[in-house]
């Protein structure tokens, strides 16, 4: 008999949701997380503040974050290029809660149009665009449940372009000036800015306090006002008594039986450095769309020499990062965007046809953005430091208009194993190959002037554009998607529409790797809804229910 | 800042050599002493036996005109050169303190000696500093995980031929990187001016840095910035002088900001 009914690998956005769904239905579940647990009272009767603080230095030292010395990655823009270190580009939280610990909490729903790329917008040369194997209607009940569990604030009806929906669990919180100035300009231009749906408490909710607007969202919430999966899904799952949380435990490979068609458990290094195996009836992988394909490739065996679940040759392929780019407005008046949540408002106008014949779909557009002084200082060339820091332009006088653009899936954009570089556990690291498709560049070129126009109309005295693709030539967007895409055809996808590997009957994926296309919205809530749906199916394949 | 490719959060690291920027020249001998008064919040109260790398009890001496705490990880001469280096990167002037008054060199010294304390002084505690309510949790540093300890010992001390520290080959420790980098500046100072780096004028030092190994200058600049604007629990930002210099409030928990403070930031 196996140790557990299910073992989940990765306590980030999706894994804890799957663990919560199963544990709350009486399943005995283990949750493996390679990072630390910064929440000493997690799972106890009284959840208290975390170990996070308003402290930039800890962030610089990769506290609870992917540390490029512990876990390096390499990058190349094409197969012909020599790899270079990826540093902390695309780094996410490495701790209980994963990327949901340091994210802004932006939690919009993806829309039906996001799931129909091929049929609505047509094929794209050199890209593997497809339709999703499910509809918005399939996802909606899981969105409802995930929004309640995580605790999402927002106001239904304020985004005229979204599918009909019920009320949010919480009303929107306070608006910082960085948002209000841009709302002004956006409305004058006829756009429809609205409160960003966010995983941040605006009121006391499920035992967690309201946000006090300290502005250090990117460093982990000290008071648990942010609905990271740690203080929501993991905490609630622990309270059922059915979840065993194994923090500081790094998965090494998925173990299978001789046929390779059935997983038996997961081999991992525990907190003391000793190798262990946890056995389970089901294995749910939720590392993220770089780490999960890496683990599948590391799990190669005699019956599956190219990696687990990889008979299609698609494991790691069609990796997407979104295209994220900004117009940075510099204002004469004081803005101080570091006060309050990073982003509080958004607009979806650019996801809608604008009547032009050459329209290309743009993405959800955020209003706000912030920076703190250590990060600001380090970005400056030192000979200009004193002058620029004293002026305080970026600390006190900017606000940004940022588009989350949809990048198309390209088979050659992928994760595989680096032949030379190892992580601290002695395992080959992920090698990322990624180049921007011409269509994606067309989105940037088309919409950058629109974003700049919003900043100017809002009163910015000067406006600069910035593309998150140009950081050392490596995209740094934090939206890692697509590398284990789901679909109905085992030759053209890695998992079935429920997230199960086509090749292995009891291995499931519960992270952004499932996305067949990247969508025009921040992806976290969709990952959580998919994870919920997958777990519901595992629990009751005959009649999955939210 | 007209260049379309120059905004944060990704200013490129290109060197600015043009004359458009007026860099304020600071004299090497300047008043750390004036800033060495008693600190109001004794930071050892909750700090266990963590030593007093960032505290005030530390004795100091003067080397080449720079104030140097006794017992630094770098030799006193190299620490003086470090002060001269960080002062050139973030100079002080009559309107605001620079890296040296903010004790950024002390910040680096605390990092280099992080493992002299238990728990090591790598990750401050949480959630609060005590400056805006709550306890002073920051000074209760957090124990490291096995992997974090391996990482930080390797980074600070170097791999020293230990197989468990060489998962990607040999690593030169931070102390040695500073010793090598500072010694190279010493050689350059002697060659160009026949004097020690710590004794050069601000202009002379900055000119040498523009011609120096950029990897080392970037390393020191990063730590000068962290030491100037980071939380004082790490040994720098003395009396919050780094934040005061740029009109920044720093940490705010558990108080946070009111709706009025967000909507009317011009009121202070």
Image: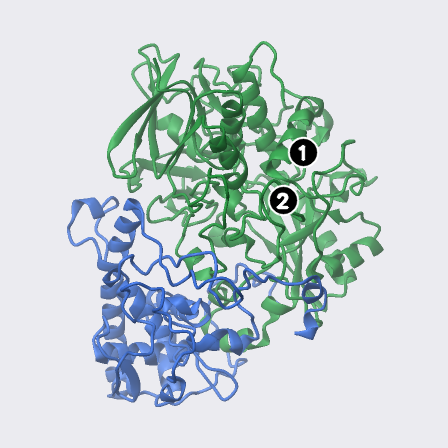
Chain colours: A green, B blue
Q: Residue A103: image x %, image y %?
A: 55, 47
Q: Is residue A124 visible?
A: no
Q: Residue B7: image x %, image y %?
A: 58, 62
Q: Which mark is residue A324?
A: none
Image position of A543 with respect to B165: above or below: above
Please name which of the two marks, 2 or 1, marks the residue nearer to the observer. Answer: 2
Q: Residue A349: image x %, image y %?
A: 77, 43
Tell me the crowding category of disc 1: few under 14, some 14 to 19, or many 20 or more residues within 10 angstroms, Cα based.
Answer: many
Q: Chain of mark 1?
A: A
Q: Residue furthest left?
A: B161
Report which quarter residue A531 is drawn in: top right
Q: Label 1's element?
A: loop
Image position of B161 with respect to A320: above or below: below
Tell me the crowding category of disc 2: few under 14, some 14 to 19, or many 20 or more residues within 10 angstroms, Cα based.
Answer: many
Q: Is residue B31 left or right of residue A354?
A: left
Report which quarter residue A149 is drawn in: top right
Q: CA distance from mark 2 to mark 1?
A: 12 Å
Q: Is residue A237 left or right of residue B53?
A: right
Point out the image quarter for the C terminus of chain A. top right
Label 2 in the same subunit as label 1: yes
Residue where numbered disc 2 is placed: A106
Q: Residue furthest front?
A: A45
Front in this rendered view, residue B130 or B55: B130
């Amino acid at each position: 008999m196996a140790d557990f009914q299910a073992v989940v690998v990765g306590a980030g956005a999706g894994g804890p949701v799957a663990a919560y769904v199963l544990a709350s239905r009486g399943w005995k579940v283990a949750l493996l997380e390679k990072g630390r647990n910064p929440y000493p009272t997690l799972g106890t009767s009284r959840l208290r503040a975390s170990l996070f603080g308003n402290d930039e230095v800890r962030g610089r030292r990769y506290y609870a974050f992917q540390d490029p010395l512990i876990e390096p990655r390499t990058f190349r823009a094409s197969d012909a290029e020599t790899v270079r270190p990826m540093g902390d580009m695309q780094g996410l939280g490495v701790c209980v809660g994963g990327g949901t610990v340091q994210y802004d909490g932006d939690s919009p729903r993806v829309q039906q149009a996001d799931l129909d790329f091929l049929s609505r917008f047509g094929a794209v040369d050199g890209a593997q665009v497809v339709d999703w194997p499910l509809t918005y209607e399939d996802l909606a009940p899981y969105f409802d449940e995930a929004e309640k569990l995580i605790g999402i604030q927002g106001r239904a009806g304020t985004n005229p372009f979204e599918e009909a929906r019920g009320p949010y669990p919480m009303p929107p919180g306070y608006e910082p000036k960085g948002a209000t100035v841009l709302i002004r300009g956006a409305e004058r231009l006829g756009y429809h800015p609205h409160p960003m749906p966010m995983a941040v408490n605006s009121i006391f909710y499920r035992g967690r306090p309201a946000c006090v607007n300290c502005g250090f969202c990117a460093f982990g919430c000290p008071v648990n006002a942010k609905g990271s999966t740690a203080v929501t899904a993991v905490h609630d799952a622990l309270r059922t008594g059915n979840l065993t949380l194994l923090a500081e435990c790094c998965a090494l490979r998925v173990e299978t039986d001789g046929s390779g068609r059935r997983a038996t458990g997961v081999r991992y290094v525990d907190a003391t450095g000793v190798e262990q195996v946890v056995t389970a009836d089901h294995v749910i992988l939720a590392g993220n769309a770089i780490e999960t394909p890496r683990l599948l490739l590391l799990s190669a065996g005699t019956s599956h020499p190219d990696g687990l679940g990889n008979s299609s040759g698609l494991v790691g392929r069609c990796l997407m990062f979104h295209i994220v780019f900004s117009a940075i407005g510099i204002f004469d008046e004081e803005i101080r965007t570091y006060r309050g949540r990073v982003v509080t408002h958004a607009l979806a106008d650019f996801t809608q046809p604008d009547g032009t014949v050459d329209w290309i779909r743009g993405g959800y557009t955020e209003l706000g953005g912030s920076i703190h002084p250590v990060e600001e200082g380090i970005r400056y060339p030192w000979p200009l430091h004193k002058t620029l820091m004293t002026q305080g332009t970026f600390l006190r006088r900017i606000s940004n208009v940022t588009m989350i653009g949809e990048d198309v899936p390209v088979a050659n954009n992928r994760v595989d194993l680096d032949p030379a570089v190892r992580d601290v556990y002695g395992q080959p690291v992920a090698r990322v190959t990624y180049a921007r498709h011409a269509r994606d560049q067309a989105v940037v070129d088309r919409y950058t002037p629109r974003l700049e126009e919003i900043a100017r109309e809002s009163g910015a005295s000067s406006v600069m554009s910035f593309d998150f693709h140009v950081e050392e030539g490596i995209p740094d967007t934090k939206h890692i998607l697509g590398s284990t895409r789901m679909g109905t055809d085992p030759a053209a996808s890695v998992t079935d529409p429920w997230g199960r590997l086509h090749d292995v009957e009891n291995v499931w994926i519960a992270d952004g790797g499932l996305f067949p296309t990247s969508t025009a919205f921040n992806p976290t809530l969709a990952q959580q809804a998919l994870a919920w749906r997958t777990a519901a199916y595992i629990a009751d394949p005959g009649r999955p229910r939210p | 800042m007209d260049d379309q490719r120059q905004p944060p959060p990704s200013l490129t690291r290109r060197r600015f050599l043009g004359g458009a920027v007026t860099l304020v020249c600071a004299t090497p001998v300047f008043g750390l002493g004036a800033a060495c008064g008693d600190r109001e919040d004794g930071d050892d109260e909750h700090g266990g036996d963590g030593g007093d790398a960032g505290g005030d009890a530390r004795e100091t001496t003067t080397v080449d005109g720079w104030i140097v705490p006794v017992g630094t990880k770098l030799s006193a001469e190299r620490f003086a050169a470090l002060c001269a280096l960080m002062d050139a990167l973030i100079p002080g002037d009559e309107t605001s303190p620079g890296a040296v008054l903010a004790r950024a060199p002390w910040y680096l010294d605390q990092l280099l000696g992080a493992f002299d304390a238990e728990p090591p002084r790598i990750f401050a505690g949480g959630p609060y500093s005590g400056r805006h309510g709550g306890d002073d949790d920051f000074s209760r540093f957090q124990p490291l995980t096995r992997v974090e300890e391996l990482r930080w010992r390797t980074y600070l001390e170097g791999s020293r031929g230990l197989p468990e520290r060489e998962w990607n080959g040999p690593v030169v420790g931070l102390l040695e990187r500073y010793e090598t980098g500072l010694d190279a500046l010493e050689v350059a100072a002697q060659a160009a001016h026949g004097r020690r780096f710590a004794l050069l004028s601000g202009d002379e030092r900055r000119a040498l840095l523009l011609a120096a190994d950029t990897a080392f200058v970037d390393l020191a600049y990063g730590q000068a910035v962290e030491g100037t604007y980071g939380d004082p629990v790490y040994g720098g930002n003395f009396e919050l002088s780094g934040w005061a210099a740029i009109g920044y409030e720093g940490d705010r928990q558990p108080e946070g900001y009111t709706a009025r403070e967000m909507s009317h930031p011009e009121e202070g």
